[in-house]
């Protein structure tokens, strides 16, 4: 019989929602265990290649659904390791959105003014820096110049990147080997470790059950470190408080699979998924027109020819983030670098006479790869995603050794969602095709459906029990002691990069989670401190899984 461990707090996932919870609860004196399904990687592990088994395939989770594919983090630090670290605050109008509900989606207790102090805390902890034009690399400069030429504005975007330390290698999406990107490996997670929290990589949570005393039992399997399709021994840990932060593509799946042992889930678990209204366009620039029209020159006679140099996104156009515009017509546009692999496969050939994504014309497009620019749209979608029955294990049926799987998400874009996409496509085309600068084409939805790197809202907070799985304290309705603090708790699309908002919401939730833990007998206090941060990510030596965690009688 497998021994059952026990702890005060069990955190599922180590991204923004999980790391922030682990830090504050550990600092407050609680015994904390974090289970992370991915490996533990640090700066020295982040490789600059696309070989199977490199950090690129080990740290990503790409799940193909029915009409929507989701790209997320799969490692200690979660999405903070593989994100581009662009950290704007959500526009004020976002908190008043109604979507298709006909009423405000966000809880009455939360608006931009309420969230601003929590944004401030995260911005200090990571830290988040305002950007300057002097530090903008070539791709951002090209996008800014094109916007100015078209009569639009452009802005350097705030980021959690030490730009003085950044080498502009443009590999940050696969982890930053120079630790210039301020991932959670450099702040909240080492802070949690310093206060006694345990972080266990390659532990995939399968479901939760309830004990007779009202605590919870979290059941997991050990994931093979090379072939993620292989699961090894099972285990379980009892906890008085469970914080679920496995990501918007996995949290609802874990909770749905737990319904048999926990009882009925709120109706909104696994519904109202949002892809943050995301869409991509690829532009192929005419280098001579860049010189003649925009007057750009890198200093060696080359106008641009630098898609692979820099970091991204670092420049955004926020002209359409206007609260007076109708809902579903507001969006932001960012310059983005998408590395070879998925980006080159899905990029479409502008004005193709034959196939748009393969063939002779695609080969010619790939030959001009250094003259590309990818423009990233974040708009207002309709929360139309729904999760079907969960797979037997994990959040997807994996069909490759690492990274790739097929999941239960179904997504059919509504006319509202398409309105935002179509408007943004026309805007990008108008900006970049002026005076023959470039040829533009959006990525197709035909191959893998829509796609998102910022999944949201599959287990969202709200005031209406019919349309929100969580109350405004992030507690799962009818399941006291279970909290959700990841992107799945965000009510809907934000029109900007969501990492700072996810983190701010997690910070805001912590005093209430501490109070709930106290009520359930955990000796913990909310201290309100912030992690001091480190300059280098360090992967600790393997630990005894049972060390310092007592077995239940």
Image (cartoon, rainbow, N blue to C red):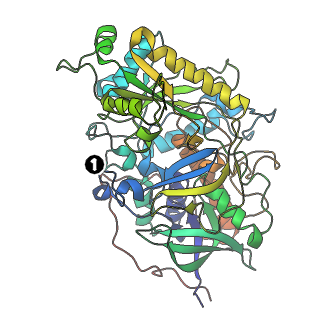
Q: Which of the 4 image quarters holds residue 243? A: bottom right
Name which residue lies at 68% across and 44% down.
411
Q: Give whichever of 90, 65 is nearer the camera.
A: 65
Residue picked out by circle 1: 178
Left or right: 500 in relation to 416: left
How many numbered callouts? 1
Name which residue lies at 36% across and 50% down.
175
Residue 141, quarter of the rendered image: top left
Residue 57 shows up from this direction: yes
Image quadrant where one finds the N terminus: bottom right
Q: Percent x, y for residue 53?
A: 36, 61
Q: Is residue 522 left or right of residue 193?
A: right
Q: Is residue 7 left or right of residue 327?
A: left
- The residue shown at (50%, 20%) is 428
- At numbered mark 1, what does the secondary structure look like: helix, strand or loop? loop
Residue 126 percent location from the top left of the image: 42, 46
- Picture layout, residue 63 above or below residue 496: below
Identify which residue, 470 or 308, lies in the foreground. Answer: 308
| Quadrant of residue 373 within the rendered picture | top left
Does residue 515 appear in this view? no
Q: Give whichever of 8, 261 is nearer the camera.
A: 261
Q: In front here: 526 or 333? A: 333
What percent of the width, then of the height, locates residue 218?
Answer: 62, 73
Crowding around mark 1 (Cα neighbors within 10 Å: few <14, some 14 to 19, many 20+) is some
Is 451 drawn above or below residue 479 in the view shown?
Answer: above
């Amino acid at each position: 019989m497998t021994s059952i461990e026990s702890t005060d707090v069990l955190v599922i996932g180590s991204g923004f929602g999980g790391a922030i919870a682990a830090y504050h609860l550990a600092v407050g004196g609680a015994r904390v265990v974090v289970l992370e399904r991915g490996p533990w990687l640090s700066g020295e592990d982040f490789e600059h290649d696309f070989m199977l088994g490199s950090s690129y395939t080990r740290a990503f989770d790409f799940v193909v659904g029915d009409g929507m594919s989701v790209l997320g983090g799969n490692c200690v630090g979660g999405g903070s390791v593989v994100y581009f670290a662009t950290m704007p605050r959500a526009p004020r109008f976002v908190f008043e959105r109604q979507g298709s509900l006909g009423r405000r989606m966000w809880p009455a207790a939360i608006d931009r003014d309420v969230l601003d102090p929590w944004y401030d805390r995260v911005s200090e902890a990571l830290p988040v820096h305002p950007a300057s034009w002097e530090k903008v690399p070539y791709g951002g400069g090209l996008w800014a110049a094109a916007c100015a030429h078209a009569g639009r504005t452009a802005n350097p975007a705030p980021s959690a990147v030490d730009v003085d330390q950044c080498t502009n290698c443009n590999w940050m999406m696969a982890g930053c080997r120079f630790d210039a990107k301020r991932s959670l490996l450099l702040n909240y997670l080492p802070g949690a470790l310093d206060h006694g929290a345990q972080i266990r990589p390659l532990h995939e949570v399968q479901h939760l059950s309830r004990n007779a005393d009202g605590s919870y039992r979290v059941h997991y399997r050990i994931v093979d470190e090379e072939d993620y399709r292989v699961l090894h021994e099972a285990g379980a840990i009892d906890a008085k408080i469970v914080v679920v932060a496995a990501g918007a593509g996995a949290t609802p799946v874990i909770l749905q699979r737990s319904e048999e042992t926990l009882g009925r889930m709120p109706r909104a678990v696994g519904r109202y998924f949002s892809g943050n209204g995301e869409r991509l366009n690829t532009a192929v620039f005419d280098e001579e027109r860049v010189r003649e029209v925009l007057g750009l020159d890198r200093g060696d006679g080359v106008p641009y020819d630098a898609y692979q140099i820099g970091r991204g996104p670092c420049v955004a156009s926020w002209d359409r983030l206007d609260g007076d515009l109708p809902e579903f017509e507001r969006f932001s546009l960012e310059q983005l670098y998408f590395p070879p692999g998925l980006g080159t496969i899905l990029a479409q050939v502008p004005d193709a006479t034959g196939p748009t994504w393969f063939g002779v014309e695609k080969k010619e497009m790939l030959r001009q790869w250094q003259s590309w620019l990818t423009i990233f749209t974040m708009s207002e979608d309709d929360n139309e995603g729904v999760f079907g029955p969960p797979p037997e294990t994990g959040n997807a049926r994996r069909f490759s050794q690492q990274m790739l799987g097929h999941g239960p998400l179904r997504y059919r874009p509504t006319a509202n969602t398409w309105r935002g996409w179509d408007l943004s496509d026309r805007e990008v085309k108008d900006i970049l095709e002026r005076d023959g600068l470039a040829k533009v084409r959006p990525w197709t939805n035909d191959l893998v459906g829509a796609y998102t790197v910022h999944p949201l809202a599959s287990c969202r907070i709200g005031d209406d029990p019919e349309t929100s799985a969580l109350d405004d304290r992030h507690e799962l309705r009818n399941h006291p002691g279970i909290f959700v603090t990841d992107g799945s708790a965000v009510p809907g699309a934000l029109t900007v990069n969501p990492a700072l908002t996810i983190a701010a919401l997690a910070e805001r939730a912590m005093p209430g989670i501490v109070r709930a833990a106290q009520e359930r007998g955990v000796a913990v206090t909310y201290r309100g401190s912030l992690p001091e941060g480190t300059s280098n990510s360090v992967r600790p030596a393997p630990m005894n899984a049972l060390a310092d965690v007592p077995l239940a009688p």
